[in-house]
Amino acid sequence: MTDEDPPTRHGEIGPAEWLAMNRTGSFDWDLDTGTIDVDRSGLLVFGLAPDDTYDGRPVSLIARLAPEERAKLEEVVRQAVTSGEVSYTAHFPIPQDDGPPHWTHVQARILRSPDGRARRIVGVVRDTTAEVTRIAFVQELERRREVQTNIVERTTRALSRAVTVDDVTAALTGPGGLARLGADGLALGLVENGSLNIIALSGESLDVLNDFRVRRLDRGLPLAEAVLSGRPRFVSSFSTLGQDYPELAPYLARLPFRAACYLPLVAQARSLGGMALYYRGRTSFNADERNLALGLAAIVAQSLQRAILFDEERELATGLQATMLPRRIPEITGGEIAVRYHAAWSGRQVGGDWYDVIPLPRGRVGIVVGDVQGHDTHAAAIMGQLRIALRAYAGEGHAPSTVLARASRFLAELDTNRFATCTYAQVDLGSGTLRAVRAGHLGPLIRHTDGRVGQPKLRGGLPLGLATAFGDEEFPETRLDLVPGETLVLCTDGLVEQPGSDIETGLTALSEAISSGPPQAEALADHLSERLWERWGSGDDVALLVLRRSPDPGTVRAPRIHQYIHQADPQGLSDARAAVGQALRDWGMEELADDAELLTGELLVNVLLHTEGGAVLTLEVLPEPVRRVRLSVQDRSSAWPRRRTPGEAATSGRGLLLLDALASRWGVEPRGEGKAVWCEIGPVAVTAGSAVNGS
């Protein structure tokens, strides 16, 4: 049917009715006598027979009108007559005994006497049912077209953001997915190795079709038949499907649908699979609805084709990247290491982030975390080459600065314009010494034994590759000390970069997560992944390495604690004194707590004021028959303390005097590049029932 044809739907009007309902009549209403003279056509418009039964009264003419319509018409006439108007119009339905109401349109002119009094009303009356029906049909047609356009637009918009096959199924089955399709249920299948695998079911009770999720591609089911034939099938009586597909018959009674369409998914002449749409209220499919279903199938097929190709490329890329990262992490003595790699949720899930753990001579271990510029297979390939080269240079025993200088030269000589950033450290877990270098990368974070997290200042060089290009291959080393029980964290920027925020915000969040996390390396790595990568790092790759030096609590009879205090950290100094006092009270040595706190403060202040860098505090109980407490503060300065005789007004120089007064003995010992100042207080006799608790 075209827009020019008389309507034959939405009112069921035939040609005879079309002519009958286009009548126009006239009337003459004498207001003085209260009678209306209506011609033959006018009576037919009002639904009255043109015979002698009409008595000329206005009330008889509009007797068929519904009370509310009659009241509205009377009000229109009254308002026009009393307000001095010269004309009025009215439009109202007249109920029929055997069908829908007929619409009537009145156009009238009011004739008045010279004094303005209304005397007569003359006018025409038209049957406008055909016009109203046609307008309603056009409006309904436009509404349906708008609905269909909306379905196509919303589905296209949702699928335009789908990258993987999982994204496509999420768009179709997630919140609002069925509403976008205009359906009540959906089944989506892909052809794989001669089988039709149902990868998505959405809609009430459709889980009963789980028995058909993986089936050989044959004509035993309607969706498989649509895929094999390449032709859609529209089913207006869902319950009759069991006659053509007996295997499906036992399941049909458990499905609340009345109609369905089975659509092949074809893209570039390749059969990808099929899609079934199910409907509760529909019992037929007109031409527009069939075309809409076919259009949706084409949109889904194109999205699936892109997603399948993307998944294939990603599988190849991630396989390549997996071969570039270490297959296993070597076991280490004196600590524990955990590593994590998280691929971005978007894109090809492949990039240049990497980690490595390298066994070194003399029981040391090298650790590195880095990032090659870019997020593609080229970045992954370069990462693999660079990781192997850096591993080789480190394994030869070179100093960290030399390792990065050679790695930069290696990257610059490759046929690429990519650069890389990394942080590399040689770790001696026996002594807790780290020698770290940084090439344009984030520095490490250290979680101390009291839960505080510090960010050591590592002097850095240019990124690898760029350093050689600019002739600046200087990578200054920074020495760090890991106290037993402390944890070092290295990561790439994907873990701390939040869209819309600067990196300092991410580093603060990382510090808080490290502080609040569990102490074990594996558990802390999981904690950081859950708290941060899933929060905002999903748009970038992440490499994470967590190294924890084993705690050294001593024994029950000889407990021990270690703590690192940063230089220029008054709060750290106060916390260290409090930790010493609390430990001695916990160990049942309350009488030594005050002296130990005072000596702790003096030893630490002397180091923090007169040396560069922080200090390591060790508190331990010497396991002798008569127990003593030993305090030790280690620093990196080779200058030994010297005794002075302070004057009365001097503000310093009394530290060693306090040691003499409060300690039973004290001394200074060389420790590698630095020294340790120690003192002992006690002895304390062991009383019956006293206990010492491990830290």
Image (spheres, grey):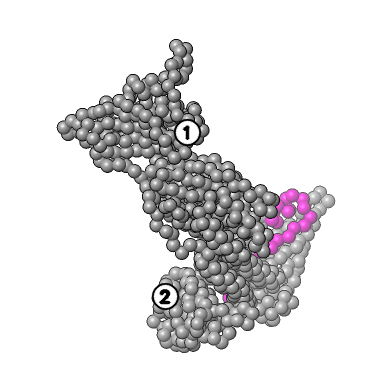
Label 1, secondary structure: give it: loop
Is any part of residue 29 visible from this angle?
A: yes
Q: Can you tell which mark lies on residue 638?
A: 1
Q: Position of residue 441 (x, y in %)?
A: 58, 49
Residue at the spot x=52%, y=80% of the render? Answer: 191
Q: Is residue 529 above or below residue 480?
A: below
Q: Nearer the viewer, residue 372 or 174?
A: 372
Q: What residue appears at the point 43 percent right and 52 percent down from the top-left corner?
A: 362
Residue 687 located left or right of residue 379 = left
Crowd tier of the residue under label 2, counting other residues whose Cα lies within 10 Å: few below 14, some 14–19, many 20 or above: few
Q: Is 528 on the left-hand or right-hand side of 438?
A: left
Location of residue 65 (image quadrant): bottom right
Magenta stretch holds residue 82 = yes
95 and 559: which is toward the camera: 559
Mark 2 or mark 1: whose residue is earlier in sequence: 2
Q: On screen, 667 above or below 338?
A: above
Residue 210 is tagged as 2
Distance from disc 2 to disc 1, alpha carbons, whole Å, reads 75 Å
Percent across and percent down for residue 667 are 37, 29
Looking at the rendered image, the disc whose residue lies closer to the viewer, 2 or 1, is: 1
User: Is residue 654 found inside the magenta-colored segment of the image?
Assistant: no
The one nearer the camera, 659 or 313, is 659
Badge 1 crowding class, 10 Å Cα cut-off, few under 14, some 14 to 19, many 20 or more, is: some
Q: In which image quadrant can residue 539 be found?
A: bottom right
The residue at 41%/44% (across/down) is: 431
- Measured as percent of width and height from the top left, residue 72 is found at 64, 57
Q: Amino acid at mark 2?
A: Asn
Chain part drawn in magenta: 76-103
Quadrant for residue 256, please give it. bottom left
Q: Amino acid at mark 1?
A: Ser
